[in-house]
Amino acid sequence: MTKILNKSLPPLLGLFLALLLMPMASSQAANYKAPNFSLKTLDKKTIKLSSYKGKVVYLDFWASWCEPCRKSFPWMRKLQSKYKKQGLRVITINLDKDKAELKRFLRDFRINFPVGLDPNGKVAQRYRVKAMPSSYLIDRKGRVRYVHLGFLQKDEKKTEERIKKLLKK
């Protein structure tokens, strides 16, 4: 059903409808090369996934209208602070077309990680994002190891254990 939505509707509308159809967060193991990307940030810097090779990356796709995204930001900030010295990098990718909404959202948080801008959803399509938020745990070799759709606080511990496991490799 999600494939049908993504082909026949604009990317963000398809993502929104997929989120409505998804009853809860889900997580799955994966093992494929992470698609590289290059995106601008609000301050016109460039984020390139390839520049994080050798790091464990927690890549999170989000939008300002997404309430679970709002709940995930303090946790991602904590992760970045706690594991940065061990090699973790949190990168987020925002899908809002309206920069004013994005800026309003970010005012509520003291982020310590970059936010790439993907208003047309091109990078999200390459990652086959199906829900907001969607996160991808990428190992030091640039391979997606876990994909997590949605955000529930009960999943934080399990995700953190996966991060610690990848940081040890």
Image (cartoon, rainbow, N blue to C red):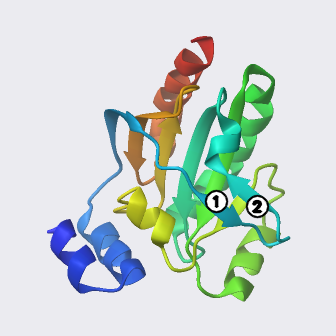
Q: Amino acid at mark 1?
A: Ser
Tell me the quarter of the picture where residue 99 sits.
bottom right
Q: Amino acid at mark 2?
A: Thr
* Circle 1 Cα neighbour tier, 10 Å, few/some/many (<14 / 14–19 / ≥20): some
Q: Position of residue 156 (x, y in %)?
A: 53, 36
Tell me the quarter of the picture where residue 26 sits.
top left
Q: Is residue 108 visible?
A: yes
Q: Nearer the viewer, residue 140 or 94?
A: 140
Q: Is residue 70 visible?
A: no
Q: Earlier in the sequence, mark 1 or mark 2?
A: 1
**Residue found at x 70% / y 50%:** 74
Q: Nearer the viewer, residue 16 or 144?
A: 144
**Residue found at x 54% / y 20%:** 166
In the image, is 131 to the left or to the right of 89? Answer: left
Vertical order, 113 against 122 (above or below): above
Q: Position of residue 17 (x, y in %)?
A: 30, 77
Location of mark 2 (residue): 46
**Residue found at x 39% / y 42%:** 147
In the image, is 46 to the left or to the right of 31? Answer: right
* Circle 2 Cα neighbour tier, 10 Å, few/some/many (<14 / 14–19 / ≥20): some
Q: Nearer the viewer, residue 50 or 82?
A: 50
Q: Which mark is residue 23?
A: none
Find numbered disc 2 in the image and state the secondary structure of the residue it sits on.
Answer: strand
From the image, which quarter does the N terminus lie in? Answer: bottom left
Vertical order, 31 against 41 (above or below): above
Location of mark 1 (residue): 38
Tell me the quarter of the picture where residue 24 sits.
bottom left
**Disc 1 to disc 2: CB gap under 8 Å:** yes
Q: Position of residue 163 (x, y in %)?
A: 56, 26
In the image, is 109 to the left or to the right of 116? Answer: right
